[in-house]
Amino acid sequence: MQKLSKVLMLVGSLLLLLLFVTPLWRITLEAPQYPGGITMYIWINKITGDTPYTLQNINILNHYVGMQYIEPDSIPELKYFPYVIVAMVIFGVVTSLTGKRKLMLTWVLVMAALGALGLYDFYLWEYDYGHNLDPNAPIKVPGMAYQPPVIGSKMLLNFNAISYPYWGGLFLGLSMLMAATAFFIGKKKESKKEEKAVHKHSFATQG
């Protein structure tokens, strides 16, 4: 059990490295003029599209309704997120080598907190882009905001904005699940050890 717990913790923490090769999130805009949709991918260190011109096309659309241009180089989170992930991988590997349940629980809680903060930061980013509009935009609809959903779909004028986790987001969730499983397996083993110790003590007392 102890060996399985360590392996799960090790594999779970190393899964985070896949965030460097696949996006965390995907936002797709569907409209009659874009029958196939245009998709933007959000990574831990960059923002890309399904074509080399996706961001350019989205920024053109944003210009008409007064939204800010999406400029990945100006987003600070994309600069420090990679370091956070690397730090958590190192923390996870060290934890797997020690096999200490307290460190496993700490790793899971820290990752859960980082995930929650990341989603909240994503919401604030979308809110700013969708509400902080240029009053001189060519297209103005009173009371209209253009904030895409964090998860799900939402109609924005004639565009259907669809937002869901991508492979990186799924790997992140699987990483946390494996680490949590490692923690509970270790807990089960400790409970059995305590139970054996109680029986041994009881037997010695009776003797």
Image (tube, rainbow, N blue to C red):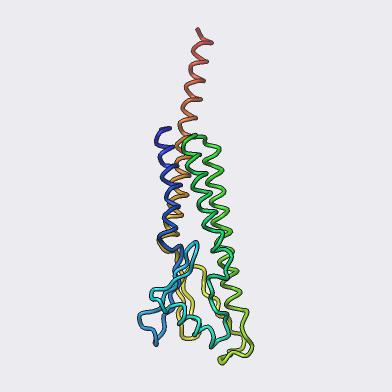
Q: Residue furthest bottom?
A: 138
Say if 112 sits above or below 47 in the image: above
Q: Position of residue 39 (x, y in %)?
A: 42, 74
Towards the viewer: 22 or 193: 22
Q: Residue at x 53, y 83 (%)?
A: 62
Towards the viewer: 150 or 93: 93
Q: Looking at the rendering, in which quadrant would you find the N terminus?
A: top left
Towards the viewer: 78 or 149: 78
Q: Position of residue 136 (x, y in %)?
A: 62, 90
Q: Residue at x 47, y 49 (%)?
A: 176
Question: Residue 171 appears in which quarter of the rendering?
Answer: bottom left
Q: Is residue 118 left or right of residue 179?
A: right
Q: Position of residue 15 (x, y in %)?
A: 42, 50
Q: Residue at x 53, y 10 (%)?
A: 205
Q: Position of residue 134 (x, y in %)?
A: 62, 85
Say if 80 sits above or below 136 in the image: above
Q: Residue furthest top?
A: 207
Say if 118 sits above or below 182 in the image: below
